[in-house]
Amino acid sequence: MPRFERLFVHRLARQVLSRLCSRTVRPPRKAADLADHLDRALDSVLLNIAEGSGKEPGSKDRAGFYRTALGSAKEAAAALDILTIRGFVDAGLSAAAREDLLSVAAMLHRMAEK
């Protein structure tokens, strides 16, 4: 199992992506760009955690990838908020996903500071 798959932060981010993909409906055309933005932000979280975990511990490269993942997690939370406010995502699903995304962001912040 690759190192990144053992990281709790990666497993939690993956769970958010999986939950949102399996329980959201395709939004109408006017919200499609924002839904795509949410998808790309969630992908970025997972990809940057994976890439950062392969870098030398304590290196600037590793911290940089974790900072990028942190920014993407915050961006995903904001996109999710907008889609929820506009009625395209169930409020209960959104609240749970947003809480998990903020936990992911907090973990990534600590990881980037190491």
Image (spheres, rainbow, N blue to C red):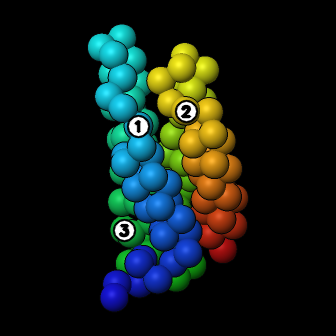
Evaluate whether residue 78 shows in this view.
Answer: no
Q: Which mark is residue 90?
A: 2
At a point 41% along the width and 84% down the height, the residue shown is 3
On screen, residue 20 versus residue 97, left or right, reads left
In this view, 7 is above or below 23: below
Q: Earlier in the sequence, mark 1 or mark 3?
A: 1
Q: Residue furthest top?
A: 30
* Secondary element at image label 3: helix
| Horizontal and vertical percent position of residue 29 | 30, 14
* Secondary element at image label 2: loop
**Amino acid tagged 1:** Thr
**Amino acid tagged 3:** Glu
At a point 67% along the width and 58% down the height, the residue shown is 103
The alpha-carbon separation of the residues under discs 2 and 3 comes to 32 Å
In this view, 84 is above or below 10: above
Cβ atoms under marks 1 and 2 closer than 8 Å: yes
Dot 1 alpha-carbon crowd within 10 angstroms: few under 14, some 14 to 19, many 20 or more: some
Q: Earlier in the sequence, mark 2 or mark 3?
A: 3
**Amino acid tagged 2:** Asp
Q: Quadrant of residue 106?
A: bottom right
Viewer-nearest residue: 74 or 55: 74
**Residue at numbered disc 3:** 51
Q: Which mark is residue 24?
A: 1
Evaluate whether residue 58 shows in this view.
Answer: yes
The alpha-carbon separation of the residues under discs 1 and 3 comes to 28 Å
Dot 2 alpha-carbon crowd within 10 angstroms: few under 14, some 14 to 19, many 20 or more: some
* Secondary element at image label 1: loop
Q: Nearer the viewer, mark 2 or mark 3?
A: 2
Q: Earlier in the sequence, mark 1 or mark 2?
A: 1
In this view, 20 is above or below 88: below
Q: Nearer the viewer, mark 1 or mark 3?
A: 1
Viewer-nearest residue: 44 or 11: 11
